[in-house]
């Protein structure tokens, strides 16, 4: 992966926009985006922390023959132990809507974050070890896939890297969209590398808009009720555009820096920050039966 080194975040983001998707360093791009909204933070210390994460995972991987041979469970355990064990990361379910949960600098400082922010660290660690992994565009909740020669694992990094089976995914989509929701083709769509830091930035903008419209921001549990998680609340906040100063247009929307949004292939026409993480009517077509979930959803 090509790592971006630039004194100014906007220059680094623009340089990233000119790279092929496969060459993007997800953590480096997310760090530069975080610098825009945290200009006084010690971003170099965060970059050094990324190196510590990579070193820890590589050292553990070299000592594990199963992981070296492609055992996905062994790889999952190494990643989970490094990120959630040694470095103490966890999902922030108490103040989920806090903007700091989507800013990678603040996530590193607090060791707490949103699923997509934690996913960036997981993807960074997997890249360091040379393991195939990608973000999963699950409705309302970012997931991560580890892929190997004999299949893949779908993980909830917000829950410490828990493996999600078909029944878990079905329960999750019902919690996000309501009891009538069912798994359907496309819910485990792989995200491009560009889309992952862009989604984190979008969450940050949505959290800001959500906070402006609430008496007490950050008091809404992730799954307070079926279909009433923060992503749904943010979608209802009416935030077509983030507030001035959030710099969302610096990544992935029309008028952004050259090339950065070019790799996006959204199945949802005209995405808006408040609606990107809410289920779209287009995705409600072609539901599959519970009996066919395992084959249709989890097959490599």
Image: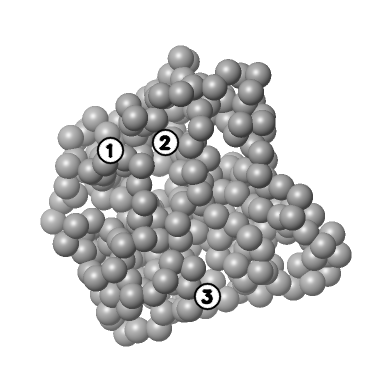
Percent of width and height locating residue 51 = 57, 76
What separation in Å lies between label 2 and label 3 (alpha carbons)? 28 Å
Q: Kindly identify which numbered label has been placed on residue 193.
A: none
Q: Residue at x 56, y 60 (%)?
A: 123
Q: Earlier in the sequence, mark 3 or mark 1?
A: 3
The residues tagged by marks 3 and 1 sit, at their Cα atoms, a distance apart of 31 Å
Q: Residue at x 55, y 55 (%)?
A: 134
Q: Nearer the viewer, residue 3 or 221?
A: 3
Residue picked out by circle 1: 275
> Left or right of 63: which side holds 226?
left
Q: Please, which colouring scheme is shown?
A: one colour
Q: Tell me: residue 222, above or below residue 225.
A: below
Q: CA distance from mark 2 to mark 1?
A: 10 Å
- Residue 147 location (% of width, % of height): 66, 53
Residue extending farthest left: 244
Q: Residues within 10 Å of mark 2 (few under 14, many from 20)?
A: many
Compared with residue 214, is residue 240 higher up or lower down, i.e. above or below? below
Q: Which residue is mark 2?
A: 140
Q: Nearer the viewer, mark 2 or mark 3?
A: 3
Using the image, determine if residue 37 lies above or below residue 147. below
Task: Give the mark nearer the N terminus: 2 vs 3.
Answer: 3
The residue under label 3 is 1
């Amino acid at each position: 992966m090509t790592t971006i080194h630039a004194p100014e975040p906007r220059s680094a983001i623009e340089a990233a926009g000119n790279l092929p998707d496969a060459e993007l360093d997800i953590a480096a791009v997310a760090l530069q985006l975080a610098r825009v909204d945290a200009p006084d933070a010690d971003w170099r210390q965060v970059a050094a922390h990324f190196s510590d994460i990579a070193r820890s995972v590589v050292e553990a991987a070299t000592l594990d023959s199963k992981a070296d041979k492609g055992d996905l469970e062994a790889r999952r355990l190494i990643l989970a132990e490094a990120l959630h064990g040694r470095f103490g990361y966890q999902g922030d379910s108490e103040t989920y809507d806090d903007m700091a949960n989507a800013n990678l600098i603040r996530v590193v400082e607090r060791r707490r974050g949103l699923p997509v922010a934690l996913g960036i660290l997981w993807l960074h660690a997997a890249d360091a070890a040379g393991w195939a992994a990608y973000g999963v565009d699950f409705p309302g909740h970012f997931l991560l896939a580890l892929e190997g020669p004999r299949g893949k694992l779908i993980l909830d990094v917000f829950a410490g890297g828990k493996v999600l089976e078909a029944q878990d995914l079905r329960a999750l989509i019902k919690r996000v969209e309501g009891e009538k929701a069912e798994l359907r083709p496309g819910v485990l769509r792989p995200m491009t590398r560009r889309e992952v830091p862009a989604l984190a930035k979008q969450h940050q903008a949505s959290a800001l808009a959500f906070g402006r419209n609430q008496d007490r921001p950050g008091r809404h549990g992730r799954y307070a009720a079926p279909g009433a998680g923060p992503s749904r609340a943010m979608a209802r906040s009416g935030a077509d555009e983030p507030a001035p100063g959030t710099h969302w247009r610096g990544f992935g929307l029309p008028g952004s820096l050259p090339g950065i949004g070019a790799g996006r292939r959204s199945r949802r026409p005209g995405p808006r920050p408040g609606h990107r993480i809410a289920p779209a009517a287009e995705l409600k077509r072609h539901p599959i039966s519970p009996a066919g979930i395992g084959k249709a959803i989890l097959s490599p």
